[in-house]
Amino acid sequence: MPNKISLTNNFPSIQKSNDLYNRAIGLIPSVTQTLAKGPTQWINGVAPKYLVKGQGSHVWDVDGNEYIDYLMAVGPLSLGYSYPEVDAAIRKQLEDGITFSMMHPLEVEVAELIREVIPNAEAVRYSKTGADVTSAAVRLARAYTGKYKILCCGYHGWHDWYIAVTARNYGIPESVLANTFTFNYNDMESVKNSIDDDVAAIILEPVVFAEPRDNFLNKLANLCKEKSIILIFDEMWTGFRMALGGAQEFFGITPDLATYSKAVANGMPISILTGKKEIMKLADDDVFFYTTFGGEALSLAAAKATINITKSLNVPEYLNNQGKKLKDGYNTIAKKLGMDYTSVLGYNWRSMATFNEKAGDPLIQKSLMQQEMIKRGILWQGFHNMSFTHTDTDINYTLQALEESLIVLKKAIEKNELEKSLMGEPVKPVFRKTDNFNTKPKINQ
């Protein structure tokens, strides 16, 4: 029988997952379309690999096992799986068509909605992925300023200008490598030390997990204004979660350009670029940014429904309240157990468990926790991406599972049996960091 969500489960049977995985090896490079969903980020041999159904905050894998999900498709499902009003809007639009030979009224209607809730949205453009709109923002900034260098802080997608600063920058010309640099979050000196007269834009995630200190974001905005540098907020995570109007509403800072995607359409593929008219108008005739599927109507219908629901039900407040219960609960349990080497940090709506190396390899600790949480019916990577359908029942059960899993971790550490306790291959690191992105292109080392 497939596992239900229970504290008494055995490890799930994942035979069908493994069969599909074996078919994908050699056919699909890295076997996944999204790194965070792939097998390197899950304990291989214990975790399922393929999901086939979602409802609310719960998912079912291809073998029929049920789980509470705290990844929520790596962020897009702010309302939850199969949210009725959003699905109804998609079905209604599907009756009339998906994409058309001319523009669709939803392009205007959704842009007007976005203008109402996003402070800098004097003009709005759509695309399909976050990388599309961050790259469009960078191109507009270069066109507007006549400068070329970009300073970044955070994760901004797979395109050349950004991925140049990571270890996975093969295939990128040196001329591109020479034009992107990084700075450290909450470190104005690292920003100032990276600026020269050819910096066109500074792009950053306004927050990842660390909170801005010492008025960092305001100082950054003032510096950009002083130096005639375009300030771009990458709001893939903060948009429609931190506040309806994202980080720019929450902090009261209006960037020149901003980009959105994850939470705006509850899982449908759409990304949004917003900005000041004098910059965005360059996309009229001078900067080319067009795509066949930019006006695809199912995603626009989903976005319209999601924004209206998020506004009318005050979804950001709910995410904050539910996430606080989980975050504070974890930290209370860890303190009670005397486990000062693990805690949860970040904002309530998206928090992250951390593990100190004094108790052993943090990735091994995380892997053991993930293993034990999966056994108890919870998909867990250490992140808590909250949705509107994470109920009190989910939270209370999760805290019970976390306590049992933390006890397993504590005993393994005390017995010096951390690696021995793993039933599969541990998770592997990715190039992304949480608050220090100071990795420069090789030619600038």
Image (tube, rainbow, N blue to C red):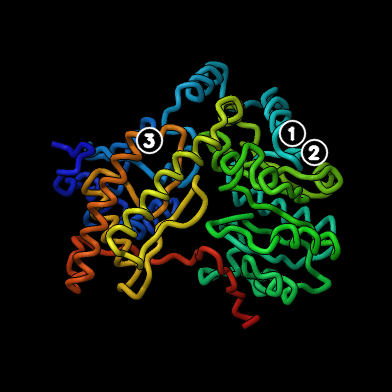
Mark 1 or 2, nearer chain start: 1
What is the three-letter code of the residue carrying label 2?
Glu
Classify residue 193 by image quadrant.
Answer: bottom right
Pick the residue in front: 164 or 242.
242
How far apart marks 1 and 2 lie (CA) works out to 6 Å
Q: Residue furthest bottom?
A: 445
Q: Is residue 360 left or right of residue 120?
A: left
Question: Relative to 12, is 428 above or below?
Answer: below
How far apart marks 2 and 3 lie (CA) works out to 35 Å
Q: Is residue 174 left or right of residue 199?
A: left
The reply to whether discs 1 and 2 touch (Cβ–Cβ < 8 Å) is yes
Mark 3 crowdedness (10 Å alpha carbons): few <14, some 14-19, many ≥20:
many
Q: Which residue is mark 1?
A: 115
Image coordinates for residue 57, horizontal then vertical, percent: 38, 35
Mark 2 crowdedness (10 Å alpha carbons): few <14, some 14-19, many ≥20:
some
How far apart marks 1 and 3 lie (CA) works out to 30 Å
State the residue at coordinates (72%, 74%).
Answer: 194
Q: Do we see residue 43 in this rendering?
A: no
Instruction: Look at discs 2 and 3 and give the one toward the viewer.
Output: 3
Image coordinates for residue 378, horizontal then vertical, percent: 29, 45
Q: Which residue is mark 3?
A: 57
What is the three-letter code of the residue carrying label 3?
Ser
Mark 1 or 3, nearer chain start: 3
Q: Which mark is residue 147?
A: none
Image coordinates for residue 90, horizontal then vertical, percent: 52, 23
Q: Which residue is mark 2?
A: 122
Classify residue 212 by image quadrant.
Answer: bottom right
Instruction: Provide the secondary structure element on which disc 2 rests.
Output: loop
The reply to whether discs 1 and 3 touch (Cβ–Cβ < 8 Å) is no
